[in-house]
Amino acid sequence: MALLDICTYPDPVLRRKAAEIKEVDRDVLKLIDDMAETMYDAPGIGLAANQVGELLRLLVVDIQKEDCEHGLIVLMNPVIVAAQGEITCEEGCLSVPDFFSSVKRYEEITVRGIGRDAKPLEINASGLLAVALQHEMDHLDGKLFIDRLGLIARDIFRRKWKKKQKEAQT
Ligand code: NI
């Protein structure tokens, strides 16, 4: 296994739509393992393939909560088939370091996709797990959590980001 470099905003790869995985071959399995290792090392609770520069519909999530029945979730070609309720959580992203803001999402979702064993996998998720899955699925469509902010929060992000850039230059 190997640690992968995480692409950060404004890397254009984060804005591209990832492609369906046709076959769970050896390369895909290696990518899954490397992504999981990279996520735990960061540390983070989720990672999408776009974030490591691979435009494939693949995500890994582990919210690392004892009361969560799921450990590491590996999901390919995920689709939301049911959703209800509303939840607002403070989110961050390994690709948008040092910035956190509240985002509104579905409270409960059912997601269907393919698991690591190449078999169909359906996950019922609520709360933080539902939020993490929706956040990672956004990545696969080239979307970041900062796109879901209101005008004021987005303005705060822009100012913080500009400030950070200035600091990096000096
Ligand atoms: Ni993210």
Image (cartoon, rainbow, N blue to C red):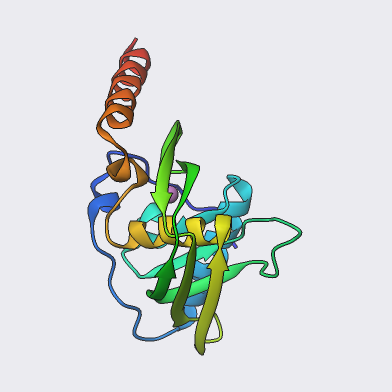
In the image, what residue occupies the spot 29% across and 36% down? 150
Q: Nearer the viewer, residue 115 or 52?
A: 115
Q: Position of residue 138 (x, y in %)?
A: 34, 58
Q: Position of residue 85 (x, y in %)?
A: 45, 61
Q: Nearer the viewer, residue 83 or 53?
A: 83
Vertical comparison of 14 with 92: above or below: below
Q: Residue furthest right?
A: 66
Tell me: 18 left or right of 94.
Answer: left
Total numbered labels:
0
In the image, what residue occupies the spot 60% across and 58% down? 37
In the image, what residue occupies the spot 70% across and 70% down? 69
Q: Is residue 2 visible?
A: no
Q: Nearer the viewer, residue 104 or 169?
A: 104
The picture quadrant where one finds residue 96 is top left
Q: Residue furthest top?
A: 170
Q: Nearer the viewer, residue 153 or 18?
A: 153
Q: Is residue 20 visible?
A: yes
Q: Position of residue 34 (x, y in %)?
A: 54, 62
Q: Residue furthest bottom?
A: 119
The picture quadrant where one finds residue 112 is bottom left
Q: Position of residue 119 (x, y in %)?
A: 51, 90
